[in-house]
Image: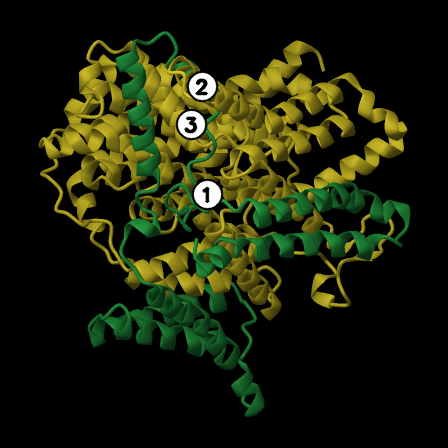
Chain colours: A green, B yellow
Amino acid sequence: MSRSDFWTSRLPVLFSLLILLVFVVAVVQIWNFPLRAKQFPLTIGIPMLVLALIQVGLDIFKPRKHAGPAPSMATGMGMGAMPAELQQATSGQGQDDRARLEELRHELEELEDLEDAETIPHTKRDVVIALVWFFSFFVVLWLLGFMITVPLYTIIYLLVVAREKWWFAGVGGVLAWLFLWAIFEQVGHLPFFPGQVLTWLGLD
Amino acid sequence: MPPEAVQVDILQAFTSSLFEVLSWPAIGYMVLGMFIGFWVGILPGIGGAATMALMLPFTFSMSPVAAIAFLLGMYSVTATTGDITSVLFGVPGEGSSAAVIFDGFPLAKQGQAGRALGVVLFTSLVGAIVGAIGLAAVIPFVRPIVLSFGPPEFFMMAVLGLSFVASLSGGSAVKGLLMAGAGLILATIGQDPGTARLRYTFGEPYLFNGLNLVPVAVGLFAVPSIVEMMYLKTSIARVKSSEVTGAMQGVKDTFVHFWLTIRASLIGLVLAMIPGVGGGTSQFIAYAHAYQTSKRKDLFGKGSIEGLVAAGAVNNSREGGHLIPTVAFGIPAGAAMALLLGALLIVGITPGPAMLTTHLDVTFSMVWTMVVTNIITVIFCLIFVKQLAWITFAKGSTLVPFLIFLVAIGAFTANNAWLDIVAMLIFGVVGMVCTIWRWPIPPLLLGLVLGDLAERNFFLSYSLFGWTWFTRPLVMVLMAIALAGLFGPMIWEFVKARRTARPALAVREADGVPI
């Protein structure tokens, strides 16, 4: 295993360490509270702290290679553990039937991942660009507020990323603004914040 | 209450809830939910649970029946419409639609797409009705059990639900438990109900009232879906679909294999009652059953109507099964049910005994919502089945700006605070990281949803019984089941590994190869 593979296979330990830190903070923070306030958090926190230590140990000393594609972000989970009863579903079968069912089970596992990111070609650059676009909406939102950000972002995204025609992007922006204004401001009376730029300029 | 009065009470709630569901504005919200669920089921990327998280904030001002009609109407439809893309394009619109591809897509390639769609749509309807009947039928039996539960039993039910979801939601049980524990700890943020001390707020006023479910749910489920849509940039339809005719033949096929439809529906209903048992497990067991009982095993995987019937029926019957532990015991069977539970808490209803007594009409409204939405959806799909195929050519990237602003609005409406949006983004990052490094997300959400109830029941148990509450018979039974659910799969894997190693060992010994 190369040095880079060694460290890459151990990156997940960072998240395990973060989880461990959560439980350490949870236990330490609550320690001096009255019994009523700390009873439940400690009942959960102490065993979880032990489990977290075990998980960190597993991630450091026994990192797992991924058996197949990562779960889709859309579902957040893979197929799920198959309970032992599945074996009984094939009991009493001839060898051919059992083998065929096993084949079908593997196909089902693959099909469940079919909409998975790893089956559609994309690069790390695609992911980074997507993340930049996603978080930039919220940066602009903080600066300019909902009423300007929503139509502006819609038009720019449809033009630049979705590569739609200018009139389609324009209509999309207008519709988005109308939807926001009609449903959330007029009907819902949501108190949208004006945006920091407008606040700094005294226009809020 | 005397038994006759109980029966009248149940019957009254059963009939009055139908009128509540069909009256305005509940029917309007149901149709709106169905419209949204229809698109979610067909279009790529965003799934049923993510959409429920997005729609959660909009239930604040609804009545309980309207909120149920909206969310459940949306959720019921996604499983049905997800089957459409499975048949036409071999791409599951929802994870629960994967098994439909086995035989649905080959049938479509043979020019029988319409027939296949007729089968899955009608079996979905039958499955949904079986699930709804199952939920309604179980209520009179479950009610006395639930009413005899005390705080210790309810606390153990929460532990049971979390342990099952933690061990069965994919990945390792240790990670599942850690996420569940993290969710329970997150639920304790804010003011302690007993002493009013502030816990884990670090001086931040935003946290004084605790973490709001909406930004967390939206962040965990919707954000990763949307980011994935942004970098994949596809539509579903990557190949042209075949001509879609002959749907009524598919409906007739359902009646030819009616008892198989019922058996597959019952499999889905029963398995769905166990928290954490995924759609894949139910689908495979129903499919395996159809295979075992078929006289034409050679057709399975190549266009078997029986296989398609089983896969179509099991999908929708699971909804009724999921609702049983959610409504009766307040134990969500998965992420979507956790969100529905969250919605019930938002509109002021606490799942558990109240759902089977004072709010029995709300419980039965779930039954009617599932039946009515599936009937309308199936009729609509059967009529417009050809036009539906065109929707799947819509580009995911065109929807992205609208989804992002819905996510932002959704999070903002929790408390009308910018920090809700920040919380949503933080949990969005957590959701993405969890997915990449295979940490299950549903236990985290369940822990957050159940945390408050679990803590109250834990404290009440201790106050009423001291530590002897651990020795109550039902508590010990539930604890044993929880431990079996946690350690059972691990022990089984160990035994399986030993059995696999033994024949190899025997072969090496027979060959005289030194071990």
Residue B486: image x %, image y %? 61, 29
Residue B312 image-quadrant placement = top left
Res. B505 mark: 2
Residue A112 image-quadrant placement = top left
Distance, label 3 to label 1, CA atoms, is 14 Å
When the figure is inspected, residue B322 is found, relative to residue B285, above or below; the finding is: below
Mark 2 crowd level (few <14, some 14–19, many ≥20, 10 Å Cα): few
For this orientation, the residue located farthest to the top is A92
B481 on left or right of B84: right
Q: Nearer the viewer, residue A162 or B381?
A: A162
Q: Amino acid at mark 2?
A: Leu
Q: Residue at x 19, y 36 (%)?
A: B383
Distance, label 2 to label 3, CA atoms, is 32 Å
B282 on left or right of B144: left
Q: Amino acid at mark 3?
A: Thr
Distance, label 1 to label 2, CA atoms, is 36 Å
The secondary structure type at the circle numbered 1 is loop
Residue B208: image x %, image y %? 75, 61
Q: Which residue carries the number 1 mark?
A: A77
| Subunit under mark 1 | A
